[in-house]
Image (spheres, rainbow, N blue to C red):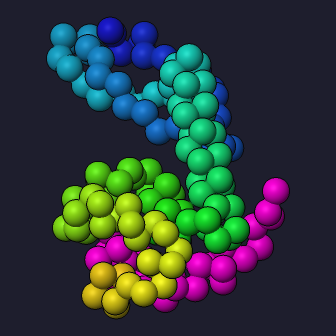
Amino acid sequence: MKEKEVPQDQIKIFGKKPPDVQYAIDEGGNYIRVKSAGWEPKNEVLRQAWEEVNENVEKARQAVTKGEKSPIFYFMHKNIMDISLLAEYTGLWRWKVKRHLKPGVFKKLKDSTLEKYKQAFRLDSIETLRNFEAETRGKNDN
């Protein structure tokens, strides 16, 4: 694609123009990077994907608030992870991570285990995991 053909559809996702870089050919025949405001179909797909991610995060938050899941479940969804990926980040077995999603098991976890989750989720402290209600206060339960 030539430099002048790079899509510049002025679509906003969540109130912002999505940053996008396209490679194009300049007048001299060299490949260059060109900033693009995006292409409407691509932007729409991205918007829908992020809406689904945000819906899943909200469902996870509600499950934790209702006592059905541990805070690890919420942060796993917030960081767009699954059990296998979280197990790799923490160095724990998948079956252990799955077990830690149970509120009763979570409450008994040692600080050293919570530290692994804190690092995987890039949290400031393990208290963020322990004090989930305080961390998410202000969100509506639907």
The front one of 90 and 3 is: 90
The front one of 5 and 20 is: 20
Quarter-wise, where is residue 86 in the image? bottom left
Residue at image location 48% in from the left, 17% down from the top: 7
Quarter-wise, where is residue 89 in the image? bottom left
Above or below, 121 against 12 in this view is below
User: Residue 34, position in %: x, y?
Assistant: 36, 27
Query: The C terminus lies in which quarter of the figure?
Result: bottom right
Query: The N terminus lies in which quarter of the figure?
Result: top left
Q: Is residue 15 magenta?
A: no
User: Residue 80, position in %: x, y?
Assistant: 44, 51
26 sits left or right of 107 in the view: left
Above or below, 130 against 139 in this view is below
Residue at image location 29% in from the left, 60% down from the top: 95
Quarter-wise, where is residue 140 in the image? bottom right
How many marks the image carries: the answer is 0
Q: Which residues are magenta?
A: 115-142
Above or below, 129 against 30 in this view is below
User: Residue 124, position in %: x, y?
Assistant: 43, 83
Residue at image location 45% in from the left, 78% down from the top: 106
The front one of 102 and 84 is: 102
Q: Taking the image as drawn, is residue 122 in sight?
A: no
User: Residue 119, position in %: x, y?
Assistant: 31, 75
